[in-house]
Image: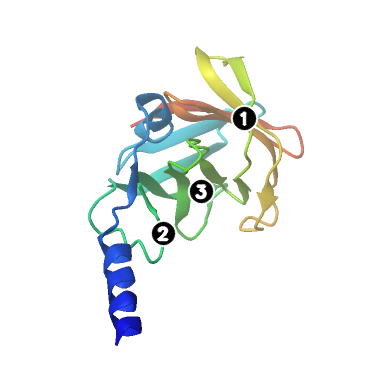
Amino acid sequence: MIKTLVTILCFTLMISCKCKQLYLTENDSLWAKSYEKGDVAIFQSNRDVNRKDTITILNKSHTLPGSDCNPLVSSTSSEFYLIEAKFQHEGQTNDSDYLLQLNKEEDGSAIPIIRIFDIEFNGSTLRDTVVTLDKFGAQNCYSFNNFQSFNNFPNFKIRNFVWSKKMGLIQYTTEKGEKYELLKRS
């Protein structure tokens, strides 16, 4: 009987414990604020002005930490962004996939997971850089060179890409050295 009461009391205490709510800072959120549902970004090749790639934003989800937290599963509830997109290169379009996933971690970090064409960056460190494009300059940019390949585009591999926290993806270079820069967004 006492064992049962202690078990019920412990269970009740565990359920009544509140989860720690983790919010992104304004600076963290910049990673996800550069795109909205319906945006289309057009990138132009440095080798042929008629060669253009597009990224179309299909959906953008933003979830705040809330009362749906289950302390039996996790002691935290995080703010979360997910941006879904379709990518087109030389007339070939991939299945929809996410472009960016961002959430606040318990250690305070908020490193984005970025998936572009057939590659994904999900590292724990970022390297800040300043980039000057043909049409404009951009600060608060990050150069990504270390990522996983998923072979969504088997004839098209990316060597690196540059992401601006204010403008999103602004440049990428293929394994053959062809550079694509952001031409316009609508």
SS of the residue at dot 3? strand
**Dot 1 alpha-carbon crowd within 10 angstroms: few under 14, some 14 to 19, many 20 or more:** few
Quarter of the image where the N terminus is located: bottom left
| Residue under the point 57% across and 14% down | 134
**Dot 2 alpha-carbon crowd within 10 angstroms: few under 14, some 14 to 19, many 20 or more:** few
Q: Which disc, if any, is residue 126?
A: 1
Q: Position of residue 90 (x, y in %)?
A: 57, 47
Task: Report which residue position mark 3 lands on.
Answer: 88
3 left or right of 151?
A: left
Check disc 2 and give the amino acid type: Ser
| Residue under the point 62% across and 51% down | 118
Q: Nearer the viewer, residue 138 or 142?
A: 142
Q: Residue furthest front?
A: 2
Task: Report which residue position mark 2 lands on.
Answer: 74
Q: Residue furthest right?
A: 176
Q: Position of residue 7 (x, y in %)?
A: 34, 77
Q: Earlier in the sequence, mark 2 or mark 1?
A: 2
| Residue under the point 66% across and 58% down | 151
Q: Position of residue 6 (x, y in %)?
A: 32, 75
76 left or right of 107?
A: left
SS of the residue at dot 2? loop
Is residue 156 visible in the rendered image? The answer is: no
- Quarter of the image holding residue 22? top left
